[in-house]
Image (cartoon, rainbow, N blue to C red):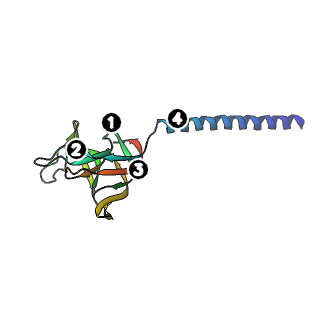
Amino acid sequence: MVTTTIIILLAAVLAFSIGAASNVGMQSHATAQQQSEEIYRIQETAMSSAAPVAHTGNLPHAVVFALPIRDDGKIYTGQVTFTASKPIEVEVIHIYRPDQPPDEAHGQPPTAVINGTTITYSHLTSIVDNNIITGDVPTASGTFEFTGSGLVFHKRSSEPFTVTYTIDATVDQLTQ
C-alpha cells in the first residue's frame, strides 16, 4: 500500500514536471513568434511633400506616406485614425503585377510607378469626414481598417497639409 502510494505520487510529480516543461516550451515558442512579428504602432504628425509621381500636365500631388510601400511579399493589416489641417484623401497602396495584361474590354485600374515599383491604389473617399470646420477652415478626419502594401494621405493639388495619425498594424506574408 505504501509502495503503491509512493509510485502514484512519483507518477503525479513526473506528469506535472513534463506538463510544466512542455508549457514552458510552448510559452517560449509563442514569445519567439511574437518577437518575430512586425508590429507598427505609430502616432505621428507629418507635413506633406510633393508626390514622387506627377500626373501628366498636373502639379505633383501633396502626400504623406504613413506606411512605406512594401514590395517584399508582405502586406500591412490594421486600423488608422487621423485628422488633417485641410480636406484630404486616403489611399491604400497595392502592388500591381497582373498575371496577364488586361485587355481593352476589361480595362486597367489606375497605376503609377514609384521608385521602380508599379502600384495601384484604393481611393478611400467615403471614410473621410470633410464636414468638420475649425473656425473658418474645413478639415478632414476619419477612422478605418485597411489591408495593403502601403498607406498614403493625399491631396490632388500641390497644396500642402499637415496630418496627425495613429496606426496600429501588423505585417503578414501573402499566401499567394
Answer yes or no: is residue 43 visible: yes
* Residue type marked 1: Asp
- List x then y, in percent, for residue 9: 81, 37
- Amino acid type shown at disc 2: Ala
Q: Which mark is residue 166?
A: 3
Amino acid on which disc 3 is placed: Thr
Q: Of 129 and 4, which appears nearest the observer?
A: 129
Q: Nearer the viewer, residue 51 or 25?
A: 51
How packed mark 1 is, by other alpha carbons closer than 10 Å (few <14, some 14-19, many 20 or more), is few
**Residue at mark 1 to residue at mark 2: CA–CA distance:** 22 Å
- At 84% across and 35% down in the image, what residue appears? 6
Q: Secondary structure at mark 1?
A: loop
Relative to 111, say whether 35 is above or below: above
**If the image is split into quadrants, where does the C terminus sit?**
top left
Pointer 1 residue:
72
Q: Is residue 158 above or below residue 115?
A: below
Q: Secondary structure at mark 3?
A: strand
Assess disc 4: are there few (<14), some (14-19) or many (≥20) residues with their C-alpha within 10 Å of its C-alpha.
few
The first of marks 2 and 3 along the sequence is 2
- Pick the front one: 64 or 173: 64
